[in-house]
Image (spheres, grey):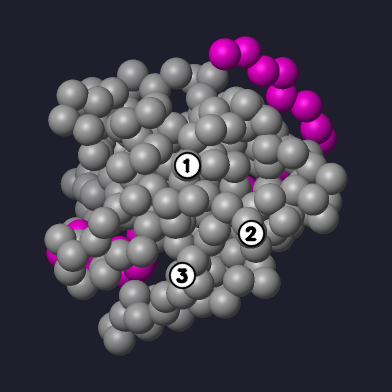
Amino acid sequence: MRYEIQGNRVIDLSQMLEPGIPAPVGFPDPQLEFFKRMDQGDVINVEKITFCPHSGTHMDAPFHFVKDGITVEQADPGVIAGSAVVVDLCHKEDGAPIEKKDVTDWEERTGEKIREGDAVLLMTGFSRYWELNDKEEKFLLKKWPYITRSVADYFLEKKIRLVGVESMDLDLIDPFDLSSSEFIGHRTFLPNGIYIIENLTNLDQIGQTRCSIIASPLKIKGATGSPVRVIAIV
């Protein structure tokens, strides 16, 4: 898949990866530990970084939910760089389902159409809660708008390449007990080669319905996902 990146304004759509960020219960905190430091007499500063690849702004590879699925280093660069459409769903209440009709109403209202090969970025405004995370896990207690079967099937029919959301998951989940969740979006998209990016931010700064994006995962052999620095170009 080839796509020419166009535009002259760059917008960072990524959250900071650091200790204490929102994540489902049981997911380890990102950690940065220096083993060489100039202030301790070493000639260089060098650190060791440990993280769960599904914390912060990250991409899910099919292997995350598919037994023999593609791992993150096998992702086609044409999937993670290219055209994107920003679907404004900021009117949705916290915890509300996202239905096919929400998307088709947006298409009718804006005159924009989701095209084959698009990355679809669902702008709900939910990233505004990111900074509420603290020891009381306020972010985890918030309920985000979530994918339903009707819109998952619609995106599959449209043959999109990627879905991005502002919440820690695109599905309706219990972040305190993941085993209780259906994962409709994950189980629809990933087996069909549609990648998922979660914990986006700054979608409201794009200011138009279309842009180009570059989302670069680390090339980690065998991984189910990776942190990504997602850049919008408009």
In the rendering, at what x and y percent does residue 171 appear?
38, 57
Assign the N terminus to one quadrant of the image: top right
- Report how far apart the C-alphas of labels 1 and 2 lie in the structure: 13 Å
Q: Does the image show residue 43?
A: no
Q: Nearer the viewer, residue 104 or 230?
A: 104
Residue occupying image coordinates x 54% and y 58%? 99
In the rendering, at what x and y percent does residue 182 appear?
26, 56
* Label number found at residue 102: 2
Q: Is residue 19 magenta?
A: yes
In the rendering, at what x and y percent does residue 116 appear?
62, 26
Answer few, some or many: residues within 10 Å of disc 3's Cα (few below 14, many 20 plus, some between 14 and 19).
many
Answer few, some or many: residues within 10 Å of disc 1's Cα (few below 14, many 20 plus, some between 14 and 19).
some
Residue occupying image coordinates x 67% and y 18%? 3
Q: Main secondary structure of the magenta part?
A: loop
Where disc 1 sits, the SS reads helix
Q: Amino acid at mark 1?
A: Asp
Q: Nearer the viewer, residue 120 or 4?
A: 120
Tell me if residue 143 comes above or below residue 182 in the rendering.
below
Magenta-tinted stretch:
1-27
**Is 111 on the left-hand or right-hand side of 58?**
right
The residue that disc 3 covers is 144
The residue that disc 1 covers is 153
- Report how far apart the C-alphas of labels 3 and 2 lie in the structure: 15 Å
Decide which of tag 3 and tag 2 comes sooner along the chain.
Answer: 2
